[in-house]
Every structure is written in structure tokens, then in C-alpha cells.
Image (spheres, helix red, strand yellow):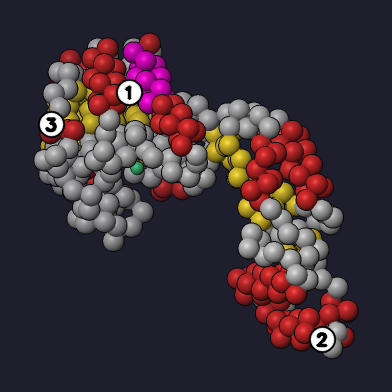
Amino acid sequence: MRILHTGDIHLDSPFSGMDVGKAESRRRELRETFIRMMRYAADEKLDMVIIAGDLFDGAYVTRETVACLIREFSRLSCPVIIAPGNHDPADEQSVWQKTVFPENVHIFKSNKTEKFSFDDLECDVYGYGFVSARETNCLLWGSVEDESRINILAVHGDTTSPLSSNAPLPVAVIRSFGADYAALGHIHNPAAANATLSDVGAYCGCPEGRDFGECGEKGAIVAEITKDGTKKEFVRFSKRVYIWDTLNIDASGDMGQIMSKVSGYIESKGYGNEVLLRLTLTGSVEPSLVINTAHLCEAAGPLFHLEVEDATSPTWNADTLLSDMGIRGELYRTLLPDLESADREKRDRASLALRYALAALSGEDISDI
Ligand SMILES: [Mn+2]
């Protein structure tokens, strides 16, 4: 059987990192990404859709979103299994308890391991749901009842730490449960966690990045499950891509030069409207040069969103500063051990201090460094 395994969709996320209009667009796009996944499942005639938790970002869910879910689920002829997560627990006030969903929708509303059986598919799906935002115990118990059937586990949980408050889920417990495929949710960037899961299952990751902690192409897993093993395929569904790059702006003389380096960079990469870019500026520039990052964001060009972060360090002429008998020299000599420290954090702090101080001593406005 072939299933669509998704989760961590976080519908109605606030997207608070961007302006109101764009945040609204991103909320709409997230819903559209969800719709594209459901229609893909229908078009590809998949046998089941699994949503492994965090379909919603929180308790606040718009009526429009609920109507969209009901419409999309009822268009599907296959079963939809939902295992609520830490962001959308099945508590008394939740959409899961209060909404009547179409008959093909099966929701794990208890934090005890349960199963739904689908005899036409010769398949049992096991799972549990979060009933509150914190679940400090492992909620997976027991093992599959009938090994001759296709057994799927659909849960939200954390395989990365036994101390997690998001339903700790040791890989050994999943393995001894004995499902043919564990469809997991919770880890949004799943590459590392999936490497430890090997053949027992996978995290699907989020289908659409929501901030710069979720960079790169996002999507869902289409899994073909048999008693002899599972073939997993990643399918991209994200409309846009978050990218976090660094740009070295060594020896830039003024803001005009930096501005053209930033727009030249964006052009050379061929980034277009699908990209949300965070650009970290590195290199060293004259201490007196004040980099106005807000102004640089005007170089966004075709990008959907640009933000610029200044991580440059000041170029100082060490010889001159060392022999300077004035306050600049004293400052430099005081900071020198830290500037040359092997500890990167110390070095960064000292060079930032030097930069602020030199800029202030030159009478620069340091409020937006
Ligand atoms: Mn999540």
C-alpha cells in the first residue's frame, strides 16, 4: 500500500517575523500547500493519508481552516489518520473534540496507544494523541497484534531525548513495537533524526518552512509499505524556500558599495520570488562604517522577503592602535587579550565592543549598529 505521510503543517501560524500583509499571504500559502498535498493523494490514488501531529499551530484555528479541512478530507476516498501533537493536543476545547469530520477521518484522541483497522487494506494503524501540550512520558506501549497484516504506527513524539516533554519516544521502543512503518511527526528538519531511525520509519518534516530555522525544500513522504520493506520517497510541496546565506563584504568603503554587493549577490544566485533570504554579512570593514541593515533590505529585488544581519568585524590597524597613547590605544590594548582569544564568543564580543567604542569616539550614531 502507498501512503502520504505528512505532519507539522502548523496551519494558522502567525508568521510574526514579517510584515502583516506578507504574514497573511504566508498563512494562505500554508493552507494551499496542505490542499496540494491532499489533492496529490487523490490524484495518485494513494491508499491512506497520515497526519502525524501539529496540523494546527495552536488552539486558535480559523473557521476558514476548519472548513478547508472538512472539504479536502471529504474529497478523498482513502482513510485519513490524525495523531494530534504538542501544538494541537486533543483536549476538550480542541477542534478534534468539537468538530464533526467526514467518516474517512480517524483521530487518535487518547494518550493511550490505540488502533484503527482497515480490513480492505489488511492494515492496522496504531497511534496515540497528545491530550495536553506537555507529555513527559513515552506514550507508546505494547506491540502489534497481528504480524501478518500491514502495521503502521502514526504518532507525534521525540526520538531525540528521553527527557523531552514532547512524548519521548526511544527508537528501541518503536523497534520493539514491531510496525512495518513508523510515520512520525515533531522534528521539522528531520535529516539527523531520520538517520538514527534507519528502517523503522521516518519523520516527515514540515511541508513548508515558516522561518529561518526551517531552511531548504520542504515536503512530505510517500511511502510504499509491504511486508518485505518500505520504499520512501520525498515529494516537495513547499511553495517557497527559506535560505540563509553569508556574504563576505571585506573592504567595502561605504553603504553604496555594500548595497551593490548585496543586490549583485542575489542576482548571481538567480533567487526569485519563491525565496525568503537571510543574508549574514561577514568580513571586516572600517570601524567607522555604520552598516544600516534596514536600508540594505531595500535590495530585495525579486525576493519574497530579505533580511540582512551584520556579523562583520572592524578592520583596525593594529600597529597604529597599539602605539596610540590616547583613549583608542588604551581601549585596544585592554581588549587585545580577548581580541586574540581562541574563544570565538570572546573574540566576537571584544570586536563588537571595539567597533561600538571606535564608532562612538568618532561621533557616529551607534544606535543602529
Ligand atoms: Mn511541529
Type of amino acid under label 2: Gly
Instruction: Give the quarter the ligand 1 occupies.
Output: top left
Name the quarter where the N terminus is drawn.
top left
Q: Nearer the viewer, mark 1 or mark 3?
A: 3
Packing grade of label 3 (10 A; few <14, some 14-19, many >=20) is few
**Residue 55 can be seen in this image:** yes
For residue 344, which quarter of the picture?
bottom right
> Looking at this view, is 24 or 233 the one in front?
24
Asked whether 39 falls inside the magenta stretch, the response is: yes
Residue flagged by tag 3: what amino acid is it? Lys
The three-letter amino acid code for the residue at tag 1 is: Ile
Q: Is residue 186 left or right of residue 150?
A: right
Sequence-wise first label, 2 or 3: 3
For numbered disc 1, what is the local secondary structure? strand
Q: Earlier in the sequence, mark 2 or mark 1?
A: 1
Task: From the image, give the main secondary structure of the stretch colored magenta.
Answer: helix
**Quadrant the C terminus occupies:** bottom right
Q: Residues within 10 Å of mark 2 (few under 14, many from 20)?
A: few
Q: Is residue 1 visible?
A: no
Q: Which residue is mark 3?
A: 98
Mark 1 vs ligand 1: CB below 8 Å: no
Q: What number is the disc on residue 326?
A: 2
Q: Residue at x 58, y 32 (%)?
A: 304
